[in-house]
Image (spheres, helix red, strand yellow):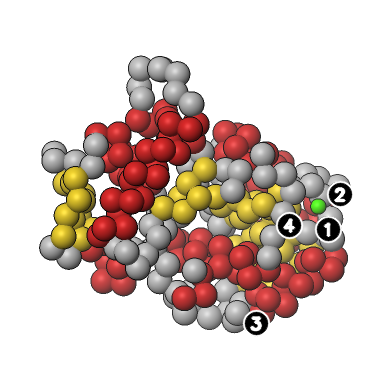
């Protein structure tokens, strides 16, 4: 377990049963969990208790999750995972740059949320290269190549830029639009399909290096993220 034992997670969710279920899973995974159901209670609670991470529903009575995320960011760097019932909304939320660390679609499985919580907390830990299996990857920027334990794949310029963007911010979700901005600076019109087909080819090449590990993950309705699973539970 890479998170500090007893990390305190605040679940902000107005569906009481769902909140309780999630809290039970978090506790079973070794976290402490608190639940709040009314948006107005959140900021004072966070100020008073300084949780280690917040799972924040977007639609809440009192105040909505978007406002709350911005308000919390004004005084705290606590990791925030936003939960929304609309997958298609994630792209919009990403664009708003609320300062959330991750997004998750409802309905979610509590297991999935626990895995995300662990992944986000892990990203917050100070970098420990020895523990980072992905650091075995070497990016050769001049040659558009990636090396892993003596093996090597050659990428196209676009594939390399896509990979580099995702790789440099492990865990961060990039929408297709954001990836397009990264790789095409001439405002040319490319469709989402173009990104998907580049990702597909990139994955195929990465699989030659690391057949045991999916490195680029699709996030339904949102885009892609780079992540190396180190904890079997997070797979
Ligand atoms: Ca809700």
Q: Is residue 167 above or below residue 88?
A: below
Q: Horizontal and vertical percent for residue 97?
A: 56, 37
Q: Kindly state the secondary structure of the residue where label 3 is placed.
A: helix
Q: Real-space Cα distance between discs 4 and 2?
A: 19 Å
Q: Horizontal and vertical percent for residue 215?
A: 38, 57
Which callout, 3 or 1, points at the residue further toward the start of the chain?
A: 1
Query: For mark 2, what is the residue?
Result: 61
Query: For mark 3, what is the residue?
Result: 28
Q: Label 2 neighbourhood size at 10 Å, few (<14), some (14-19), many (20+)?
A: few
Between tags 4 and 1, which lies in front? 4
Residue 120: mark = none
Between tags 4 and 2, which lies in front? 4
Query: For mark 4, what is the residue?
Result: 107
Residue 14: mark = 1
Q: Is residue 195 visible?
A: yes
Do labels 1 and 2 touch, CB within 8 Å? yes
Do labels 3 and 4 touch, CB within 8 Å? no
């Amino acid at each position: 377990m890479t998170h500090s034992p007893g990390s305190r997670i605040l679940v902000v969710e107005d569906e009481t049963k769902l909140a309780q279920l999630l809290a039970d899973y978090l506790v079973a995974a070794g976290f402490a969990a608190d639940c709040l159901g009314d948006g107005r209670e959140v900021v004072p609670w966070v100020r008073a208790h300084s949780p280690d991470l917040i799972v924040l529903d977007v639609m809440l009575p009192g105040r909505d999750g978007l406002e709350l995320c911005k308000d919390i960011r004004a005084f705290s760097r606590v990791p925030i995972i936003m939960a929304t019932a609309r997958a298609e909304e994630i792209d919009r939320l990403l664009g708003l740059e609320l300062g959330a660390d991750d997004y998750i679609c409802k309905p979610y499985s509590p297991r999935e949320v626990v895995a995300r919580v662990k992944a986000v907390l892990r990203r917050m830990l100070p970098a420990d290269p020895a523990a980072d299996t992905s650091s075995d990857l070497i990016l050769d920027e001049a040659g558009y190549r990636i090396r892993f334990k003596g093996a090597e794949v050659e990428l196209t310029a676009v594939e390399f830029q896509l990979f580099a963007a995702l790789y440099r911010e492990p865990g961060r979700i990039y929408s297709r639009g954001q990836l397009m901005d990264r790789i095409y600076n001439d405002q040319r019109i490319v469709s989402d399909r173009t990104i998907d087909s580049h990702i597909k080819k990139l994955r195929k090449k990465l699989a030659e290096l690391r057949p045991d590990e999916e490195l680029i993950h699709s996030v339904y309705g949102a885009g892609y993220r780079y992540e190396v699973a180190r904890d079997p539970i997070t797979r």
